Amino acid sequence: MVKPIAGLMGASAASGSTKLSGSEQLRLLLAALKKHDVREVDTARVYNSGKSEEDIGGVPEAQHDFAIATKAPGFSPGSLTYQKVIDNCHASLAALKQDKIDLYYFHGPDRQTPLLDSLRAINTLHGEGKIDRFGISNYHATEVEDILHLCDENNFIRPSVYQGGYNALARAAEPELFPLLRRHNIAFYAFSPLAGGYFSRSAEALRAPPPGSRMDQVSVFQAMYVNDVSLEIHEMLTKICGAEGLTLKEAALRWLMEHSGLGEEDGVILGASSIEQMQENLEICEGGRLPDRIVEAFEEAWKKFRGAGYSEHYSIPLPR
């Protein structure tokens, strides 16, 4: 079975989620996760300006009962130089109050810094016992191949997890990236399972998203999920799911767990703005397989959405 993973990004990368901020709220969240046998927690150096890691560091049981993943800041030129990767890992270790990070990612590509320099830093950290596993996020398949080649050529630790956007309307990773990951035994952890609120909000709410919400803050989500084609699909899926006694949100999460291209070594990163919402999401994920009519509807939706050209990317696009 695909494994649920608790994501601590919050409402936004910068501000986090006020309802889940602080060690006491995190302690309650972790207790809820244990009831559902969720043992992996995902955060990043940039989440809540570093406070997400500090909150985890303030809860001793997080260290003992959960595998913590965090990320070296990426994306901007020079963000993944050798020294910055080392320094950011040390900062994360201090915030988390850990001697070792279970899974340490490059959050996104730094296309100015040579890959070899960044990978050498990861190998140094692994050799020093500072990280156990290495992951990558938001890289194109050709870049993943380059990373694997350099790791093998230099006898470096290889990435064992790729984290990327994936849901019932964002399936561009399936034809190119997924086969590559399978060949190299790299797990895929899916973020944005509800498409920034597309699957959990009404069409009216999508047209006028709440201030501060993911859909309001992230322009790429608006471009992908708030257009004539996506809103028509939303209406169609909502009706079909309703006829089967399910909400679109329930169907979207269960599709990922039971009918998508994910396998038993893969994961779905579930975010939430409250403990109650996380519990609800986890219960939905345990709901089992969907009626055939809903599965067929998701396939029809994907064909229509893909044909309109709205879901071409699974990574930070390569420079032209």
Image: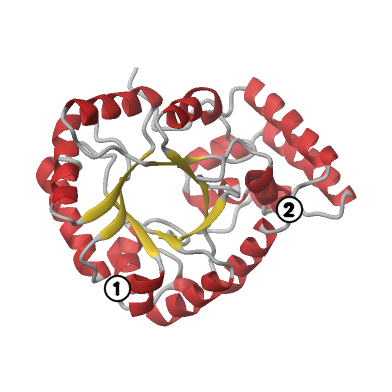
What residue is at 32 percent from the left and 26 percent from the top?
143
Q: Which label sits in the foreground, 1 or 2? A: 2
Q: Amino acid at mark 2?
A: Gly
Name the residue nearer the viewer: 32 or 243.
32
Foreground of the two, 63 or 78: 63
State whether residue 293 appears in this view.
Answer: yes
Q: Is residue 59 visible?
A: no
Q: In the structure shown, which secondary structural element does the residue marked by tag 1 occupy?
A: helix
**Residue occupying image coordinates x 45% and y 41%:** 187
- Mark 1 or mark 2, which has the lower sequence index? 1
Side (left or right) of 149 relative to 236: left
Q: Which residue is mark 1?
A: 57
Q: Which mark is residue 101?
A: none
Q: Amino acid at mark 1?
A: Gly
Please state the horizontal and vertical placement of residue 225, each as a whole percent of the image.
Answer: 61, 39
The circle on residue 288 is 2
Above/below status of 290 relative to 319: below
User: How many other residues sit within 10 Å of disc 1, few (<14), some (14-19) or many (≥20)?
Assistant: many
Query: Outermost residue, top direction?
Result: 320
Observer-nearest of 196 and 70: 70
Residue lying at 72% horizontally and 54% vertically, measured from the top left: 250
The single residue placed furthest to the left in the displayed view is 83
**Mark 2, secondary structure of its residue:** loop
Q: On screen, 308 above or below 240?
A: above
Residue 284: horizontal and vertical position, in percent? 69, 59
For this orientation, the residue located farthest to the bottom is: 24
Q: Please tell me whether residue 160 is drawn above or below residue 22 in the rendered image.
A: above
